[in-house]
Image (spheres, coloured by chain):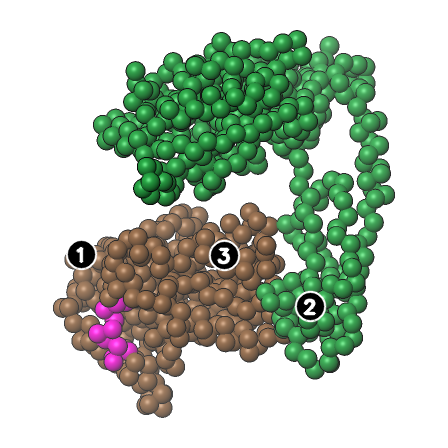
Amino acid sequence: MPEIQIRHAIRDAMREEMTRDDRVFLMGEEVGHYKGAYKCSEGLLEEFGERRVIDTPIAETGFAGVGIGAAMAGLRPIIEFMTFNFSAVAFDQILNNAAKIHHMTNGQHSVPMVFRGPNAGAHMLGSTHSQAFEPFYAHIPGLIVVAVATPYDAKGLLKTAIRDPNPVIFLESELMYGVKGEVPEEEYLIPLGVADTKRSGDDVTVITWGQGVPVALKAAELAAEQGIECDVIDLRTLRPLDMESVLESVRRTNRAIVLFHGWPYGGVGCEIIAQIQEQAFDHLDAPVLRVCYEDVPMPYAENLENLVLPTPERGLAAIREVSYAR
Amino acid sequence: MATVVELPRLTDTMEEGVIAQWHVAVGDKVKRGQVIAEIETDKATMEFESFDAGIVLKLVAEEGETLEIGAAIAVFGKKGEDAAATLASWTGGAAAAAPEAAAAPAATQAEAAVPEPAAEAAPSSSAADERIPASPVARRLARESGLELSSIPGSGPHGRVIKADVLKAAGAAKASPKSAKLEVARPKSTPATGKDVDHDGRPYASFEDRAIKLTPMRKTIAKRMTQSKRDIPHINLTIPIFMDAAAAVRKELNGVLAGVKISFNDILIYAVAKALREHPRVNACYTPEGLIEYGDVHVGVAVAVEGGLVVPVVRFADQKTLKRISLDIRDLGKRAKDKSLKPAEMTGSTFTVSNLGMFGIESFTAVINPGEGAILAVGRIADEAVVEGGEVVIRKVMRATLCSDHRVFDGADNARFLATLKKILEAPMSLFT
């Protein structure tokens, strides 16, 4: 199997779907001539032309709204946000139109589209450009939220997201576009709402997604050196949640932590922990802990930023704590 | 004719070794001088270069196995030769006598391994509905196995009963994944008094003892330190030394010297070396036939490493420059940590300095390294209020304790050496004359 970067997995997914279905088109800032701010749409303008690879003005409310209208009219738009930080400008369109139209028209209209782009802190981008948007979007009934951490998952899930009849928020990572991994040459799809166990163990369940995945895997490696074996579950889809995978694991390990790039208060981590205690209370041997950002705006200074981000060492400390390791 | 490869003596003081790693496998062709294994000795992990050539017929010793010098570790020979026959007819090495002796304690150990007494029952005073902190899974398991939560010692935070506690109480504790099974004879745990309950009448949690196998380094430390404390009458004298001038010199030197950062320890080692040259009786050792005053000044520097300590040697320290000493100590210290020091670099010291100042220790006594007459134990440097001429002034004070062998010299010699050391360190420019 060839090894490719996540950015190329995303491009290949879009190219295959645009080839397969001429209703699919890409729209956003710098997606055409500049090939995408992170080079995720390299070659698409040349292949599909300006009608299907559309450079927009810096006007997120506008092009998100145009995309929603196009989807209602029967097309399959992919809207790229240069980063999800800028999706805040289009929040009203996503919250009130994309997520609600199917419901409010009693199914007369649907909004089959994808909003995609990088999410969460990267490196020294300051507090306004380091935000983690999954709690905002996963909060909203009517949206599907995906977060990917490997080229294989990125390609398989993006293709499924483009074909899905619902609006999908597709979260990528600026730090991970260059991450390489094996991707089959033949076509494949990954269903939405199915988690993937990226490492197996019977002592502690580590639940993670997106940018948290490599941190969690490293933490699990450190724990294994101390004789603690972790199940590392990459949720891949944050709404709907694959709680069956999580609960099966927690019932086996009796201990869990949630490790993610994002803030603790009112986040996806809280939802997972709430469901664990609702559905597996009698299986818990320790409180479920979160390893995530500190509850402050992301600092710009590198030394301070490093203190806020989740690290394998902080992950290990939480794993040891829930294991009552001495 | 096949050859039996024996465990070689790799350092002067080595009595046994551990095959840390084999570099060859059965069937490999080995040349003379080829590294065939890494062997952990009392001092360092060393590469074993083969004295013999041939095909590896059998690896007798396993990785991690502790063996005496001369024990058979492998058989080399020509293809098709019988390793078992060679071993059977082999008579050399120390191993021949060893097996029976080694087997005996193992047997007694097995008999001694009595099962631990079950957790004692708690007084049944606690009310049934009293809130016992317990994890949900522990609560459920206790209920399912018909155990009273109040009778189970809780090992979690604030005495929380956790799953492991219930399993232990139910006698079904699965072995913790990290507890390696060590065959070490150990004393029995503290016996229960029958009163080990807290104010609520709940039993305290008891944790497993951990048996840690002795490494060659630990064995050497145990042997030499016991020998020293048993045979050497130690006398210990402490002197306060004002380090203000040394601090100023250090700051000035670090401002002008490139490629080196002088530490207080570097200055101390240099001053000790100079003082030893002035007091040869302190640079000496006791033998039943007579005292030996060493001609050279080789200062050992105790370095804490993972699992013990080593004492690399700054040779000819009195004749070196301060910069050279600093570079030597940095290099030796770094290589001590990654265990790549050669045995020669850890032998031949005539005097040792042990510095625990970096841990905030004020003063302490050390144990003399056998073969030497004294060891200097040095504490931290700290600002202290000192009375001088009726005034209270602030001085940087360091306390140095000379621990010496009373058979070699007496308290007054000891004091004179310390006075010289104090004089040098309080006027450190004298180091450069």
Q: Secondary structure at mark 3?
A: helix
Label pair 1/2, CB-CB below 8 angstroms: no
Is A88 magenta? The answer is yes
Marks 3, 1: nearer the viewer: 3
Chain in green in the render: B
The percent position of residue A309, horizontal first and vertical second, equals 36, 58
Comparing A276 with B86, the one in front is A276
Give the magenta part as a residue range.
Answer: A83-94
Residue highlighted by disc 2: B198
Is B44 magenta? The answer is no
Q: Amino acid at mark 2?
A: Asp
Q: Secondary structure at mark 2?
A: loop
Residue highlighted by disc 3: A317
State whether residue A11 appears in this view: no
Q: Are marks 1 and 2 on the same chain?
A: no
In terms of image quadrants, where is residue A28? Answer: bottom left
